[in-house]
Amino acid sequence: MEWVLLTALGVGGATVFGAAIGFAFKNVSHKFSDIVLAFAAGVMLAAAVLGLIIPSVEYGAQYGTAIGLLIAVAGIFAGAICLNFMDKLVPHMHKLAGGAEEKHHGNEKLNKVLLFVMAIAIHNLTEGIAAGVGFGTGNNADALMIAAGIALQNIPEGMVIIGPMLAAGVSKKRTFLYASLTGLVEVVGTLIGYFAVSIASAVLPFALAFAGGTMLYVISDEMIPETHAHGSERGATYALLFGFCLMLVFDVLLG
C-alpha cells in the first residue's frame, strides 16, 4: 500500500512540478515541449503494452487462450470508447490544428479557463486509474514503469497549463491552484484503480486491458497529434521511439 500511495503522489506531483517549470520558463519553445511530450508518449506506449495489455492477456489465459485474448481486446476497446464518451459528454475544450476550438455540449455556459482545466482533469483521472490498476498484478516493477510513463507525460502537460491561464488574466495563485487540482485528480484516480482490482481480482485481466486502452487512446488522440502540430514531427517521432525503446530495455533488465 505504501508503494501505491507514493505512486499516487508521484504521478499527481509530476503535474505540479511541470506547472512550476511553466512558471519559471513561460516561453518554452514548441519544439522543446513537443520533443519532451513525444518522449513521454513513447514511454506511455511501452507502459501500456508491456505493463498492462500483455499482463492482461497472461492473466486472462487462465480462462483459456482464446478467452484471454477476447477479454484483452474487449478491455482495450472498452477503455478507448469510455474515454471517447467522456470527451463527448463532459463539457471541456481542446485546441485543434490552426488554433480553432473543438466544440462540446455545454461549452457556452462555462468559463474557457475552466474548460481547459477540465480537459486536463478528464485525462488525468483515467491515467491515475491506469497507474493504480497496474499494482493489481503484484508486479511492482511493471506498476512503477506504468507510473513513470504517466508521470513523465504529466510534466510537459503541467507546463502547458500555465501559459493559457496567465494569458487569460488568471492570477498566479489561482493558476497554480488549478494546476494542483488536476494533479489531485490523478491521485484520486490511482487509488480508485488500486482498490477496484484489490476488491475484485477476478476483473483484473479486463481492468488491465481497459487501463491500457485508455492510455492508447490518449497517446493517439491527444499526444501524437499535439507533437506533430508545430513542424517538429520528425524529431517527435524519434523521441517517441527512444522513449519506447528505453522502457523496453528497462522492462527486460528489471524483469
Image (cartoon, rainbow, N blue to C red):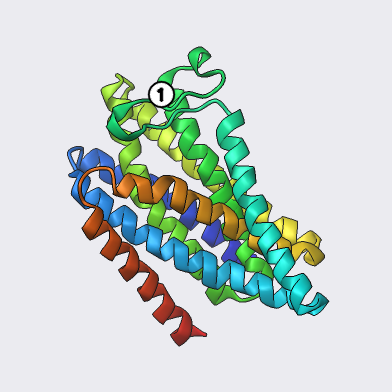
Q: Judge by depth and name the residue closer to the eye, 87 or 173.
A: 87
The location of residue 182, given as percent across then percent down, is 48, 39
The location of residue 29, given as percent across then percent down, is 17, 44
Mark 1 Cα within 10 Å, few/some/many (few <14, many 20+)? some
Which residue is pictured at 52% across the width and 44% down the height? Answer: 123
Q: Judge by depth and name the residue closer to the eye, 7 or 35.
A: 35
In which quarter of the view is residue 200 placed?
A: bottom right
The quadrant of the picture occupied by the N terminus is bottom right
Q: Is residue 154 left or right of residue 104?
A: left
The location of residue 143, given as percent across then percent down, is 56, 69
Which residue is pictured at 61% across the width and 65% down the height? Answer: 134
Q: Is residue 112 left or right of residue 88?
A: left
- Residue, disc 1: 113
Furthest toward the front, the residue is: 66
The answer, for residue 75, to whether it is visible in the render is yes
Vertically, is 246 above or below 101? Answer: below
The location of residue 165, given as percent across then percent down, is 33, 27
Vertically, is 158 above or below 76? Answer: above
Which residue is pictured at 32% across the width and 57% down the height? Answer: 38
Which residue is pictured at 46% across the width and 84% down the height? Answer: 252
* Three-letter amino acid code of the residue under disc 1: Val
The answer, for residue 205, to whether it is visible in the render is no
Question: How many marks on residues?
Answer: 1
The secondary structure type at the circle numbered 1 is helix
Q: Is residue 194 left or right of residue 5?
A: right
Vertically, is 253 above or below 128? Answer: below
Furthest toward the top, the residue is: 109
